[in-house]
Amino acid sequence: MDYYGPMSRFKRLATLALLFPLVCSSAGAEEQATPVSNSVLGSELFYQLLVGEISAQRGDASSAYALMLDAARKANSEQLYERAVVLALGARSGESALTAAQAWSQAFPASQHANRYVLQILIGLNRISDTVDPLRKELANTQGPARIATISLLPRYLARATDRAQAASAIERALTPDLSNKTTGAAAWAAVGTMRLLAGNTDGALNAARRGTTFNAQSDEIATLALNLWDAKAPAAEDMVQKYMQGKAQPELRLEYARRLAVAKRVPEAYSQTQQVTRELPGLADGWLVLGSLEFQNRQFDAATTSLKKYVELRRSSPAEAAQGTERGVVQAYLLLSQMAEQGQRFDEALAYLQNIDSPAEAVRIQGRKASLLARQGKMAEARALLRDMPEKQPEDARTKVMAEVQLLRDYKQYNEAYAVLVEAAKRSPEDVELMYEQAMAAEKIGKPAEMESLLRQVIATKPDYHHAYNALGYSLADRNTRLTEARALIGKALELAPQDPYILDSLGWLEFRSGNLQEALRILNDAYKARPDAEIAAHLGEVLWNLNRRDDATSLWAEGKALNPDNETLLETMRRLNKP
């Protein structure tokens, strides 16, 4: 029996339920002191609505739409106009939906709801040039701050337009009166610039931002556009941002500027801007998170601890935050607090911070950190049990647990145990290419190159586009200085599958070094290190420099690599072999 059909029918008849009091006469009207005025909707119109809804329920969208639009016009009802639009959209008839929305807007000229339907449908139909009038109507009858706020929202309406250049033109035409207005000029040019930027016209967007500053250099809207232009690699936009920051900038925008400075590795400037944010608006939680992260980066651990605790306190004081569990910023704060406690050998405190994190998305990562803390205290068996006891909610969780345990064992150089875990996992999932690959890497670590090669060739046979296997086997041959022609073919195949991958470039550069081509090795490894500063690449590039008698450069590069990863075995072995402490 279909228990759900009647319920869906009731939902579709919701419009009729709303209109029912208007359609029906009141029983016993003669007994009431005040005469009841019957609705203009008679039984005929009510029947029309009923037939329309039944047609919709039966899948006859065309009849349902026609009946509903006709009823909307007769009853002059916004609800019925909207129902007609929804029916047309449900039937994927954009033109019919537009007809109904336009009829609705004409019948109720003051209805913003109707106008926004018209605007969105025109955008969906890619009739961008026709959006100018609805855009102007959206702005009608708004002045001052309300008009500026509406102007700022316009690019959001047109952000999903297929032809964004045309959309930028439509916004510019709609805003013609505002572009020269002292009050709204900055916001209007910011909207035009934002749309130009979305269209990929960076120069046009920069020009719009500059024109906007002539009206108001302290415009929040222009500052936001300038920040986005800076992200889009338009360095000239930062001058506008800096001038804005010299005034009374919005703390949220100052914080965004600080984040971008941090990404650009301009840490002192980022720190200064963030300090100003926390002074001006101490209740802005994110300011303390950014400040604490920068202090952690600068190894100002006491200050970082204070800032991060302040952030957590502000977040936790919000009932909405508490109800949502641990959001990403709080996870980051607790992880940093735990890391600082761990560095101070305060393992129980580090573990306590991790216990505060309630985030399903971060469960494996957090359990991994807990396990690492236990391992550092010599409790490896307990650490491994913690990882193995994690629940498996998704099919891939079993492999994730295996890899977490393997990584823990690798971190503590227990390579034989890591290999044994992978062997057992491979028995349970013999066709799992990733486990096979990891087993190959583990086999090499414990001195079984023949098994490694056999496993990697199985990976290649099973998944011919798995570029990691080609690269690993090619690098292994090059590193052992054997079968270099075969190594070149394997690494070439890896590059064909993943062009410009810095780790594959590292393998190729190392192959050139083994082949005696020092200058070519230098060129390739330089490119790899620029693309991905990494301790292992630094080890290889440094050795090439050392053999080119550029020993100061080599030593400096190894120091950089050691700062990136002080425990990298390739780097440490290279420095020992070449007698560099």
Image (cartoon, rainbow, N blue to C red):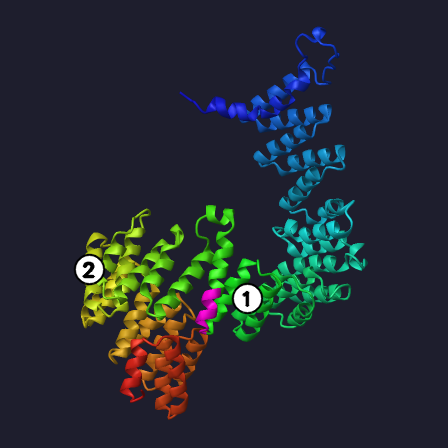
- Magenta residue check for 304: yes
Which segment did they paint magenta? 299-306
Q: Secondary structure at mark 1?
A: helix
The C terminus lies in which quarter of the figure?
bottom left
Q: Residue 160: horizontal and vertical position, in percent?
A: 60, 50
Q: Quadrant of the N terminus?
A: top left
| Disc on the earlier residue, 2 or 1 | 1
In the rendered image, which residue does mark 1 sit on? Answer: 259
Residue in front for this viewpoint, 34 or 21: 34
Q: Is residue 30 left or right of residue 6?
A: right
Secondary element at tag 2: helix
| Type of secondary structure dominating the magenta stretch | helix
- Residue 541: which disc? none
- Residue extending furthest toward the bottom: 549
Query: Is 222 or 466 nearer to us in this picture?
Result: 222
> Which residue is depicted at the point 45% across and 77% down?
530
Residue at point 43% right, 22% down?
Answer: 3
Q: Quadrant of residue 332?
A: bottom left
The residue beneath circle 2 is: 423
